[in-house]
Each structure stands twice: as structure tokens, then as C-alpha cells.
Amino acid sequence: MGPRVNDKISAKTVQVISQDGQNLGVMDLSDALNTAYDSGLDLVEINASASPVLVKIMDYGKYKYEQKKRASEARKKQKTVEVREVWVTPVIEENDFNVKMKKVFEFLDGGNKVKIAVMTHGDKRVLARTRDAVPQLFARIIDLIGDKGVVESKSKPEDRTKSIIIAPAK
């Protein structure tokens, strides 16, 4: 909801600012409304908590349009950061590892966060052999990334899928 305009203003006396920024002083609301109507503009409440209430004489339609345009520009400049995901196995072959790391670097260079997840479910005998491989794999990945990224979070030890989230370095 925007500011109150014209007849919606409830204060009895108001501090009036002209459209060119000049202070017209404290007036009764009816006098301020007449001044605004005489110039073909609206009376817009700027600060309702001030005493007396601060109002400005302006073209409200133009004001709303400019506010909308400003908000649109702010949204355009805002960058959304995605979390991209790369899956690996604890006993990954060297070539596969290099391909996955190339993808990780592409995501980081693009300004995205990367979640590197390790598949740690399956046959219990395989899990027993790979239990120590996961921390070693993560240490190797963090070493390779170096100053291009920062480890933002790690999965809990009791989580079934182990993962780390890496944010791009600033």
C-alpha cells in the first residue's frame, strides 16, 4: 500500500512542500488540498509520523510510475545465486574426477554455489571400504579449489549422503 493521497489524508494540519521542493509552511488540510488542486496536482503524504504530518504537492500518477520503474531497475541489477550440484562416488576414476572438477570450476566462475555430493549408499562391504575415502575425497577437492572458492557448509556425519557446499570466492 502506498502513501495516502488527497482526501485519504486524515491530519488536521500539515507541513506542505511544493512540487519544486520549497517549504510552504504549516497549513490546514483544506488549504493544502486547495493549493494542490489549484496547481492541478495531488497532495501526497510523505511522512505520517512527523508532527505536523509532512505532505508534498506532486503528480501522484507520475510518482507511482517512477517508483515502479526504480523497483524494476533494482530487480534487474539483482543477481540470483543458484546452487549447482555435482555428484561423485567415493572411488572415482581420475579422468572422471577431472571432468567433474572442470564442471565445478565452470559453476564457480559463473558466480554460482556448488554442492558436491558423494553417493555413500549401497552394499555394506563397499561402504566399509569407502568410509575413509569420502573425507579424503573432500580434502582433495578443497585443495584443488584453493582460493577460487570457500567451503560454506558440510553435511553432518550421520547424513546418508555426504556433501559440501562451496561458494565462489569474492
Image: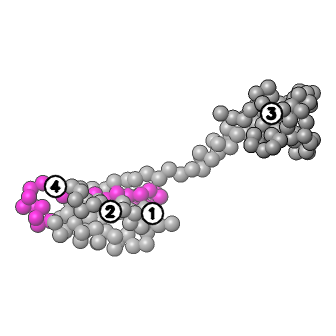
Three-letter code, disc 4: His
Q: Compute the Cα span from label 4 to label 3.
A: 68 Å
Q: Compute the Cα span from label 3 to label 1.
A: 52 Å
Identify which residue, 77 or 109, lies in the foreground: 77
Q: Give the left or right position of residue 124, taking residue 2 as reference.
A: left
For marks 3 and 2 on the same chain, the one whose residue lies earlier in the sequence: 3
Mark 1, other Cα within 10 Å: few <14 / some 14–19 / many ≥20: many
For marks 4 and 3 on the same chain, the one whose residue lies earlier in the sequence: 3
Mark 2, other Cα within 10 Å: few <14 / some 14–19 / many ≥20: some
For marks 2 and 1 on the same chain, the one whose residue lies earlier in the sequence: 2
Identify which residue, 72 or 28, lies in the foreground: 28
Q: Give how far across and how far down residue 91 sits, in percent.
A: 18, 64
The secondary element bearing badge 1 is classed as strand
Q: Which residue is mark 3?
A: 11
The secondary element bearing badge 3 is classed as loop
Q: Which residue is mark 1?
A: 168
Say which quarter of the image contains residue 104.
Answer: bottom left
Three-letter code, disc 2: Lys
Mark 4, other Cα within 10 Å: few <14 / some 14–19 / many ≥20: few
